[in-house]
Amino acid sequence: MIQGLELLVIGMISVFIVMLLIYLLVYILSRSKSVPVEPLPVLPAESSDDESAVLAAIVAAVKYEMGALDEDKQWQISIERNKGE
Amino acid sequence: MNILDFLTQGIRLLNWQMVLMWLVGGVLIYLAIEKEFEPALLLPMGIGAILVNLPLTGVLGENGIIEWLYTVGIEAAEAFPILLFVGIGAMIDFGPLLSNPLMLVFGGAAQVGIFLTVLVSLGLGFELNDAMSIGVIAAADGPTSILVSQRLQSSYVGAITVAAYSYMAMVPIIQPFAIKLVTTKRERAIKMAYNPQSVSRRTRLLFPIFVTLIAGLVAPDSVSLVGFLMFGNLLRECGVLDNLSQTAQGPLANLITIFLGITVSFQMRYQVFVTPQTLMVMGLGLLGFVFDTVGGVLFAKFLNLFRSEGNKVNPMVGAAGISAFPMSARVIQKMGLEEDSQNHLLMHAIGANVAGQIGSVVAGGVILSFARAWGLF
């Protein structure tokens, strides 16, 4: 029973230390290049005929879907590709 | 030889324990096919339970295929469960966890069920190696249960495996019951805002490598588990080995699952399975799942003591910190919607559930580290 109690206390502490270290790791990795996810813009109904608003919404939606907001290079490549086409 | 003797020797050697094990095998096959409880594992185990419990069976002994598979695939270096982790790692998307890292703490908290079950098992008179093996049922992680119980030379590997996989499949029944024991309707209705951070490719690539290093340094015996899990995940995330990633997720995982199920049935021979202790192991496994769930919920409630109103954690999310993925996350989402049709907890629960997969292998490694320190292997 003593061994069981020792396992319970030290075992749980060990598991928590590992999980907290991983938490710290994720925190540091995310802080090193943190770009908040922009909310998906909602296209206002009254501006449906506004070409630039529609275009902006489509561009933002595509960026959002690509998950590429923090991948500037990837985004740049697709812009270049579009220009080429 | 008398031809009648020759034809009836199998029948003459039959005993009631063998027939009982056929029934156990039949129940596993029934649960797999009719109830779809972990069919990929329970069906091979069910067939295996019948094969190894036939009189004069050809699958056991020096030239028996199941005994050979067991010796090579599990006993020698726990190859099957460890290799299965490559496939599991390749299947896991750590994105929901990386974008909401608070969920990691629940992956640690819910492992308390493992250690409490060890304590209860010791109280019931089990040997230390058996008690530690039984406790790992509460990891809700089949390969880890097999690996730990095998390495600790437990007498109950078969019962532990059956319990681990059966209860994983029964999470939708066990968890709601346990959660309702320790939460109020108001607590279950707590809404949580979901504001994920973006996850860069670099984070996804570095995560498996650093987790392996951390786990390896703190709990070295977890390396075979965590390391292979993270190796599989790196195959998935690296982006240059899609073929290998697909192979690990599909053919590799499927092949190992087939062999693992039928190989584990070696430990379902009536001589080692038909004992009163088997029933106790099954009962303790169930208790372990309840402990896990309650532990995760209570830890979330404890965290809420320090969080402002409007920023509280729904305590049910803590219960998702077990390894049974994605069943546990689904249960939490469903229970959240039952309390309030706008209460979507899925992404939080998935984060905690993925954290539980890491937590369970770390806890398995911690158990092995203790066992090594105590001279159990």
Image: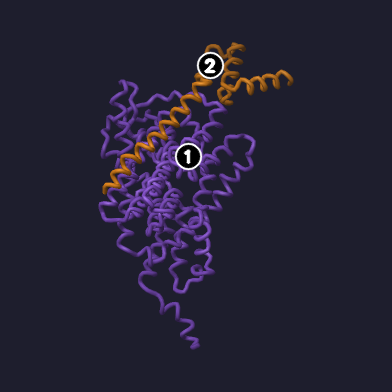
Q: What quarter of the picture does the C terminus of chain A occupy?
A: top right
The image position of residue B309, as x and y in percent, is: 30, 21
Residue tagged by mark 2? A43
Q: What is the distance, in whole Å, between disc 2 and disc 1 at their CAs?
A: 50 Å
Amino acid type for the residue under numbered disc 1? Gly
Task: Give whichever of A32, B95 is nearer the camera.
Answer: A32
Please tell me which residue is depicted at 54% across the width and 45% down the height of the picture. B86
Q: Residue furthest bottom?
A: B2
Residue tagged by mark 1? B216
The answer to whether B111 is drawn above or below residue B9 in the figure is above
Label 2 or label 1, whichever lies nearer to me, is: 1
User: What secondary structure is marked by label 2?
Assistant: loop
Q: Colour of chain B?
A: purple
Task: Give whichever of B268, B310 is nearer the camera.
Answer: B268
The image position of residue B218, as x and y in percent, is: 43, 38
Amino acid type for the residue under numbered disc 2? Leu
